[in-house]
Image (cartoon, grey):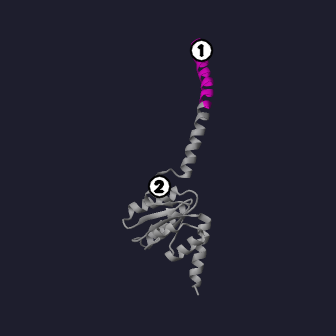
């Protein structure tokens, strides 16, 4: 009979996979408790969830959620699971930052939108602007012509007032 805690963990992993659907795998070797807390907080701020489970339990939940068996290569040795939603760029940037700052921390790979990602592909994701940044750029591009148009309309009135003022000063 399986341990109740293990069954509960498999259900939790399945729930998170059902909610988020995507996951990055990391080797968190060398992170002490304080760094782990900071890492969790940063991942949470970027919309992700960082958890550590037994690899075997993750594999069971992954199989139950119809994930490809190729992800098993990422679940060897010490593995942390970073579950992500629809915008992976913020989480990928955080992972690359942690990898640079901590020599023993390593990105193993990931699974995103039915696709296996290697470490290099996650590095490329980290270079893409986040969803919020792209929306900001789009709003700027859409708003810029309107702002210029309003400036042109105001310029005629402003120039007319300046000309009238100069004419009135000359008459004095």
Residue at 46% x, 63% y is 109
- Vertical side of 111 occupied by 5: above or below: below
Main structural element of the magenta stretch: helix, strand or loop? helix
Q: Which residues are magenta?
A: 149-172
Camera-nearest label, 1 or 2: 2
Local packing at callout 2 (Cα closer than 10 Å; few below 14, some 14-19, many 20+) is many
In the image, what residue occupies the spot 58% across and 32% down?
A: 148
Determine the secondary structure under disc 2: helix
Left or right of 156? Residue 126 is left
- Residues packed near mark 1 inside 10 Å, few (<14), some (14 to 19) or many (20 plus): few
Measuring from the top left, give residue 86's x and y in whole percent. 58, 58
- Image quarter for residue 10? bottom right
> Residue 4: x percent and y percent?
59, 84
Real-space CA distance between mark 1 and mark 2, rounded to the nearest whole angstrom: 60 Å
Residue named by callout 2: 126
Q: Quadrant of residue 34?
A: bottom left
Q: 79 left or right of 64?
A: left
Give the residue at the far front of this rendering: 69
Which residue does the numbered mark 1 point to in the structure image? Answer: 167
Q: Is residue 34 left or right of residue 4?
A: left
Mark earlier in primary sequence (1, 2): 2
Q: Which residue: 59% across, 74% down?
A: 12
Q: Position of residue 99 (x, y in %)?
A: 41, 62
Residue 116 belongs to the span the image colors magenta:
no
Of 44 and 62, the residue lying toward us:
62
Q: Relative to residue 109, is residue 79 depicted above or below?
A: below
Total labels drawn: 2
Residue 59, numbered circle: none
Residue 171 colored in magenta in the image: yes
The quadrant in which the C terminus is found is top right
Q: Is residue 126 above or below residue 141?
A: below
């Amino acid at each position: 009979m399986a341990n109740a805690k293990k069954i509960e963990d498999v259900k939790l992993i399945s729930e998170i996979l059902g909610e988020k659907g995507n996951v990055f795998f990391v080797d968190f070797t060398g992170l002490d408790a304080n760094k782990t807390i900071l890492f969790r907080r940063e991942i949470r701020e970027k919309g992700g969830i960082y958890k550590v489970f037994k690899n075997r339990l993750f594999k069971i939940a992954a199989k139950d959620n119809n994930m490809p068996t190729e992800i098993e290569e990422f679940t060897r040795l010490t593995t942390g699971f970073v579950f992500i939603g629809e915008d992976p760029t913020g989480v990928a940037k955080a992972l690359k930052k942690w990898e640079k700052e901590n020599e023993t921390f390593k990105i193993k790979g990931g699974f995103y939108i039915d696709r296996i990602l290697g470490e290099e592909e996650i590095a490329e994701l980290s270079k893409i602007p986040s969803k919020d940044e792209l929306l900001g750029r789009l709003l700027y591009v859409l708003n810029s012509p309107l702002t210029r148009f309003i400036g042109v309309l105001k310029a005629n009135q402003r120039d007319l007032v300046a000309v009238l003022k100069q004419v009135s000063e000359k008459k004095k």
